[in-house]
Each structure stands twice: as C-alpha cells, then as structure tokens.
Amino acid sequence: MDFRIFKQLPRLIYGLGSINRLPELLPDDINKKTVMIYDSAVEQVVTPQFSNSEKIILIPYNSEKSEPYTSEVAEIIEKYDDIWPDTKAIVGVGGGSTMDMAKGLSVALANGLNIDQLQGWDIPTKPGIYKIGIPTIFGSGSEASRTAVFHNGVKKQGVNSDYSMFDSIIIDPSLSATVPLEQKIYTAMDCYIHCVESLEGTYINQIASGYAEKALDYCDQYFADLQNDELIAVASYYGGVSIVNSEVGICHALSYGLSIEFGIRHGLANCIVFNVLEDYYGEYCSIFRAIIEKYKINLPRLFPDGIEPDVLDRMVKQTLLMERPLENALGSGWRDKLNREQIEQIYLKM
Ligand code: NAD
Ligand code: ZN
C-alpha cells in the first residue's frame, strides 16, 4: 500500500506555561495583525495575557452550544470583513471545536470559498493564512491533524487537507486545569479511541503505530489517577499524528451519526459507540469500560425503545459517508462486511 506523503507540523512549543511564548511563533510582518479565536471557557487565561496587545485581535467563540457549523465560519468571516486583508496569523485557543474553527477560517479565506465547498478530501488548492493551534483540553488531536470538522445541518464532515494543518502549535498542559472531570474524560477517550482505531485498522504502518502505542501508554498512565495532564497533552498530539498517517475507524463513523442527529458532542458520542463495539475492538473495550466505571461515568442508554426509521436511516447514511474510516477498519471489501442492517443493529444496542 502507498501511504500519503507524511506532512508533519513544522513547529511546536511544549511545556507548562508555554502559551506565553506565542510571540516566538508569529510571522514577522510588523504591519499586520494576529487574529486569536478563543473558546469563551478560557477567557480568564486569554484576556489578561493578550488583550493589551494592539497587534492581536481577540474573537471569543462559544463552543459550549454545539460543535462548529459551516455557517459560523461564514458569519465570522463576514463580521470581521475588514480585518482579514491585514491578518498575518490566525490562532485557535480551545478544544477541537475552536481549533477546527481557526483552521476553517484560514483555509476558507485563502481559497476564497465557503467552507462547505471544501469539505471532503484534498479540495483546497491554496495554503491557508498562517495558523497556530493551542489546545486547552486534550484528546481531540486536532492540533496535529489535517482535518477541520464541521456540521452543515445535513452532514458532519472534515475539510481534509495538508492546508488545514496548523503551521505551529503550543502544547501547554497547564491550560486544561479548569476542564470539568467528565468532559476531560470524554475528550481524553477520543484520544484513546483514535489510537485503538489506528492500531487495529488496515492502514496501520510503522510510523502510525509508533505514535499510537506511545499515546496509549500515556493514556493508561493518565487514566490511572487523572493527575498528570502532561501525559494526556502529549498523548493527544501523538494520537493525532498517528491518525494523520493512518485513519480513524468504525467508532468515529458511527459517532458522527449521533452528533448529526442528536447534537451529542464528539467525545461523549465516541464513548457511547465504543461501549458497544466489543465485536470489533475486543479487549480495548473492556479496558475502556473499566475506566468509565472507575470514574463513575454513566453513559446514557440512548435507544431503549428503538429508533424512529427516518432517524435511523439518516444515521446510517452519515455512517456510510465515512468511507475511509470504514475501509481502514474493515479493508477494501468493507461494504461486504458492514451492510446497512449491521449498522442499524449496532445503533440499536446504544
Ligand atoms: P470542544 O472543543 O468541543 O470543547 C468541549 C467543552 O470543553 C466546551 O464546552 C468547551 O468550552 C470546554 N473547554 C475547552 N477548554 C476548556 C478549559 N480549559 N476549561 C474549561 N472548559 C473548557 O472539545 P473537544 O473534545 O476538544 O473537541 C471536539 C470537537 O473537535 C468536535 O467538534 C469534533 O468534531 C472535533 N474534532 C476534530 C478533530 C480534528 O482532527 N480536527 C479530531 C477530533 C475531534
Ligand atoms: Zn475523534
């Protein structure tokens, strides 16, 4: 199998308090400004530090209400219409939602297209505006990945491109101190699941497995007591690198159905799905359940009374859109191994 060209993040600053080193990563152009889009939940970290700089324009982003929508990218572009020509860098400070928003703004602006025209694989033709990612909750791996994921009301899909990768990132493990416990676990489990899907997939290779194995080791240590955010901060990044060089799998393909239909957030949606994937991910599911039970997380039972046929149909369609994850999980003949009825049966277990 030919693997895609391995693109790696060119620059990374790591360490507790390293968000203060942002100026070291900014392009030199003194006549231009930096736009920082930050999750409103980290206002206390961002505003004291950056609001006094004339060269940084702050845009708060409310990620609590939903995962990012393509329409929000268009709204932000329009609202700040006058600043883009003088923007030298876009910085995303937050979880996967906010980092994806920063990536989306960068590629949409540079390509002169709406972001929904760029959803799919390798559609952008121009590199985006210089972009920097600073995760404040760890697990999504968006800081390392070549995708920026958006809902458009009908489907949830990534803009998958080398141009949607960050040019630099800062991994500052102190930034997640304020994340509530359950959310921390859901997002950290996203990392765990990325690694399992990478390792168990048919696209696996020595580069991806090295990163995924080390990330799983860090996840194990992290989940032992949830004390050391450095472990999950690095695991998230390694998990993301692993996915860049392999793919996610069945859990992600099914979880998008839950997000699109019920607005269930990515980390939780993945946990609900992974919990019923024993047939595919075996022992990894038992380990997952032991951690969930240890921290007394009650995963909701979604469909004790079945699922409306039209809802089920839309979820199955969303799942089947995820061709690459399904091919990674089951091989090139995946359509013979996972048909509509089988997907429905998995949803009905949730
Ligand atoms: P998120 O960005 O959706 O944030 C989850 C919640 O945590 C939000 O309410 C947010 O306000 C809060 N939060 C973030 N940082 C905080 C902090 N320091 N203190 C307190 N609260 C904080 O969560 P996520 O799990 O990181 O990302 C999920 C999103 O990322 C989904 O939209 C998913 O589709 C996307 N995603 C993208 C990739 C990728 O490679 N691009 C990978 C996985 C997931
Ligand atoms: Zn994920």
Image (spheres, grey):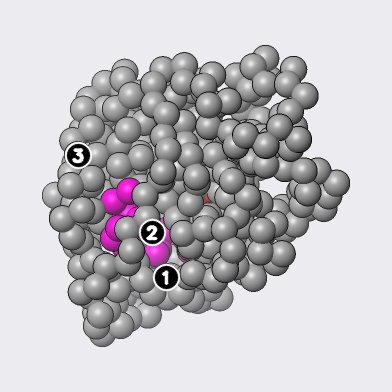
Q: Nearer the viewer, residue 95 or 296?
A: 95
2 and 3 marks in contact (CB < 8 Å) = no
Circle 3 sits in a helix, a strand or a loop, which is it?
helix
Which of the 4 quarters of the picture holds residue 192?
A: top left
- Residue type at mark 1 is Met
Image height of 179 relative to 349, above or below: above
2 and 1 marks in contact (CB < 8 Å) = yes
Identify the magenta region. 241-259
Q: Nearer the viewer, residue 71 or 252?
A: 71
Circle 2 sits in a helix, a strand or a loop, which is it?
helix
- Residue type at mark 3 is Lys
Q: Is 178 placed left or right of 334 in the picture?
A: right
Image height of 266 relative to 323, above or below: above
Spatial CA distance of label 2 from label 3 is: 21 Å
Residue 40: image location, x then y, percent: 66, 30
Identify the residue position indicated by label 1 in the image: 322
Which of the 4 quarters of the picture holds residue 185?
A: top left
Sequence-first disc among 2 and 3: 3
Circle 1 sits in a helix, a strand or a loop, which is it?
loop
Sequence-first disc among 2 and 1: 2
Identify the residue position indicated by label 3 in the image: 214
The residue at the point 35 percent across, 23 percent down is 229
Identify the residue position indicated by label 2 in the image: 252
Residue 78: image location, x then y, percent: 82, 53
Residue 306: image location, x then y, percent: 44, 65
